[in-house]
Each structure stands twice: as C-alpha cells, then as structure tokens.
Amino acid sequence: MPARSLAALAALCLIGSSTFAMAQDKPTDPQIAHIAYTAGTIDIEAAKLAVQKSKTQAVVDFANDMIRDHEAVNQQALDLVKKLDVTPQDNATSQSLSKAAADERAKLSTLDGAAFDKAYVDNEVAYHKQVNGALEGLLIPSAQNAELKSLLETGLKLFQGHQAHAEHVVAELK
Amino acid sequence: MRAVIHLGAAAVLASVLAAAVPARAETIQVVIEKLVFSPAEISAHVGDTIEWVNKDPLAHTATVKGGWEVMIPARKTVSQKLETAEAVDFYCRFHPNMTGRLKVEAR
C-alpha cells in the first residue's frame, strides 16, 4: 500500500466518524471522480429503498428527487471521465463511504413505517451535510481539471438544496 | 395660430404612428448555470421572447405558482413568448431554491 493511502487510512481510523479524512492528503482527479460517483450511487440506492419501503408521500417524493438528480449528475460524471479519458480510481475514502453506506442500508432494511421514514430522512440530512462539507472543503479545492471542478460546484449547489429539502421533510414528519 | 394648430396635428399624428408601429420585440436570454437564473430579475415587454438557456446537466423549470410553467431540459434552450403584462415570482419546481422575478410591461 502506498504511503499516501496509508496516511489517509490512518487519518480515517483516527477520526473515525469522519469519512472524508484526507485533508492532509489531497485526492487526485481520478480519485475525486471515484468519490463523487460513489457518493452519488450511495444516495441513489438509499432512495430506491425508500421508494420501495416508505408509505409517506413527502418521503417518496424526496427520494424520487434524489434518484433524478443524482443519476443526472452521475451520468454527467461518467460522460466527463470518458471525454477526459480518465479512469476513476478507487481509494480509501470511496471504500469507507461504501462501508458506512452498507451499514446504514442494513439498519434501514430492518425498519418500517414511521421509524424507517425518520431514519432515512435523518440520514439524508447528515449524509448531504457530510458530502457538502467534503465538496466544499476538500474535493472542489483539490480538483485540477476545470470541467471536473465545475461539475463538483454544480453538485454542491444541488446537494445544498437536497439538504434543505431533507431538513424540511424532517420537520414535516414531526 | 395656424402654425400652432399644424404643430399640434403633427404631434397627434406622430403619437398615433408610434402606437401603431410598436418598437421591435426583443429576445432576452436567461442563462441557468449551477442552479442559478441570471439575470434573476427580468424586465420585459409584451411581445418579447425569453430564451431560457439551461447549461446544467439537470432539467429545470421556470414555474409561477398557480400560473404558467416552462420546462427546460438539461443543456437545452427553450423560448417563451410573453403575451401578458404581469409581475410574477418564478422558481424551479425541481430545485425550489432557484428563484427569480419577471416583470412584463405593456408595450
């Protein structure tokens, strides 16, 4: 394992709760592309689960919005890496995100009704907050390619709206 | 005296002509990029056309609550002819934090 990844992993272990712990170790564009795509896929999968399980219109509507927007951005990301002839590179952050998402999905799949709605939407608020923080503080400043940076900026604006929307649904569920 | 009357008639004629031949309708571009309408404040006249230029990879709308809606697919331009004098707030139904204001005056 290269020293960079080791350092990132060590940082991850130290911080624990924070999945994006590469602040001292700037990710490369292929890694950023991988992280962004992974983060999008995680939210799409959670949303599909919500569409399947939730009986609450506001939750299902929110989940469908997540599917529509994250699929659009991920498609754009795929088109971009193809155009730039870049292969997204797996990395500790992507792996850590996927692991956390798998745990969350396992938890969600055991819940039903109001308990599911609450857990899903609460997690959407926390997740978008985490992703937006990473975009703003790490991924956007680290991105070298202008088009990648621009797509991440669009994503940040979009996901800030998602976070607000999720917060609104949380309030509505109370 | 006669000259004054002629002058007055000329002025009336001029204003009638001005009303009959309206100023050219304009096309106003509103660019949507990174989930922002710009300009967000649009001033226009009846007969003008708005060109909604969507540079985002996402579909957006320009929607007036209880009124009209224009769908603007990802990376497409959609034209909307303004037929009515009105002052309205609009937003994107998919991304409600995108907002703007349109003022259409009679020509």
Image (tube, helix red, strand yellow):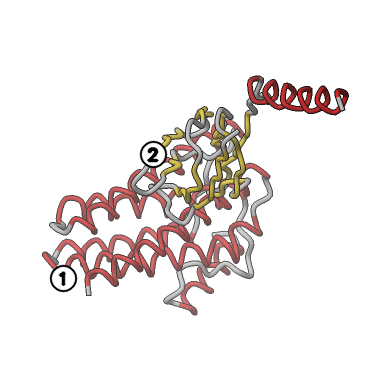
Res. B49 image quadrant: top right
Give how far across and how far down residue B57 sits, in percent.
50, 38
Give how far across and how far down residue A105 sits, in percent.
24, 61
**Could you tell me which residue is drawn at 52 percent across and 67 percent down?**
A133
Give how far across and how far down residue A33 sits, in percent.
53, 47
Give how far across and how far down residue A171 sits, in percent.
29, 72
Marks 2 and 1: which is nearer the front? Answer: 2
* Residue type of the residue flagged with mark 2: Trp
| Alpha carbon separation for disc pair 2 and 1 | 38 Å
**Could you tell me which residue is drawn at 14 percent across and 66 percent down?**
A111
* Residue type of the residue flagged with mark 1: Ala
Q: Is residue A114 above or below residue A150?
A: below
Q: Is residue B15 above or below residue A107?
A: above
In this view, the residue farthest toward the bottom is: A14
For disc 2, the chain is: B
Q: Read off the residue under disc 1.
A: A115
Nearest to the observer: residue B44 or residue A111 = B44
Q: Is residue A174 above or below residue A127?
A: below
Q: Quadrant of the N terminus of chain B?
A: top right
Q: Which mark is residue B68?
A: 2
**Considering the numbered disc 1 on the image, is that residue within a helix, a strand or a loop?**
helix
Q: Is residue A86 above or below residue B92?
A: above
Nearest to the observer: residue A29 or residue A13 = A29
